[in-house]
Amino acid sequence: MIIATFAFYLFAVVAVISGLLVITAKNPVHSVLWLILAFFNAAGLFVLLGAEFLAMLLVVVYVGAVAVLFLFVVMMLDLNTLNFREGYQQYMPLGLAIGLVLLVELATVGAGWALLPEVEGQLAAPIAAAEAAGLSNTEALGHILYTDYVYFFQAAGIILLVAMVGAIMLTHRSREGVRKQKIGRQLARDPAASVEVKKVETGRGI
């Protein structure tokens, strides 16, 4: 119990510190590296909670794919951090207000869990039911996700689809000096007007 408590506080403290360094680091590459560290510590917390599947999913998907993709994109774009910091003071009050609202919401949820004993029983009930039925961690998660929360799961998929379409539309915006492939014009081209057949005599060039 002492080792588990020590590991929990270690993972939690490192995750909070790395999360703060993600938003305070001046170099975008360093921010991505701190983000990877935060993901690893969050995976450690999942292991302590008995959710090994979520821990492995966090490491494989977010660290192995998303964070590495962020790192390569940031390194290839060679972003100018000086332009990002220009004019940030005018947005500081709005950012502080949003952060304060989120902090109040988290404190309210945490206080509600601490003050209501039945909430703890509701959280422990699915775990006890899964253990009684002999289901593994992955099977219990899939059963709950695709039965009780299937509509929320589909809504999350739709939101991600809209975000993906929005990102594609932003990257394909019209910009001067950028030549793009126009498939319609390529397909509409007449071969007779595009290809000229030359008869080359033997021993002579064109």
Image (cartoon, helix red, strand yellow):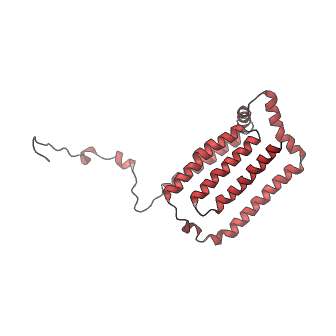
* Residue for point 60% across, 71% down: 87
Against 151, residue 106 (above or below) is: below
In the picture, measured across the screen, residue 79 lies left or right of residue 127, that is left
* Residue for point 61% across, 43% down: 61
* Residue for point 73% across, 62% down: 99
Judged from this view, the residue extending furthest toward the top is 134
Q: Could you say which is closer to the camera, residue 201 or residue 28?
A: 28
**Which part of the image, by quadrant, shows the N terminus?**
top right
Judged from this view, the residue extending furthest toward the front is 3
- The percent position of residue 2, horizontal first and vertical second, equals 83, 44
- The percent position of residue 98, horizontal first and vertical second, equals 72, 63
- The percent position of residue 132, horizontal first and vertical second, equals 82, 29
Q: Could you say which is closer to the camera, residue 70 or residue 34?
A: 34
* Residue for point 65% across, 60% down: 23
Against 11, residue 150 (above or below) is: above
Against 29, residue 121 (above or below) is: above
All told, the count of numbered labels is 0
In the picture, measured across the screen, residue 55 lies left or right of residue 5, that is left
In the picture, measured across the screen, residue 97 lies left or right of residue 31, that is right
Q: Could you say which is closer to the camera, residue 39 or residue 194?
A: 39
Against 194, residue 170 (above or below) is: below
In the picture, measured across the screen, residue 8 lies left or right of residue 171, that is right
- The percent position of residue 120, horizontal first and vertical second, equals 86, 43
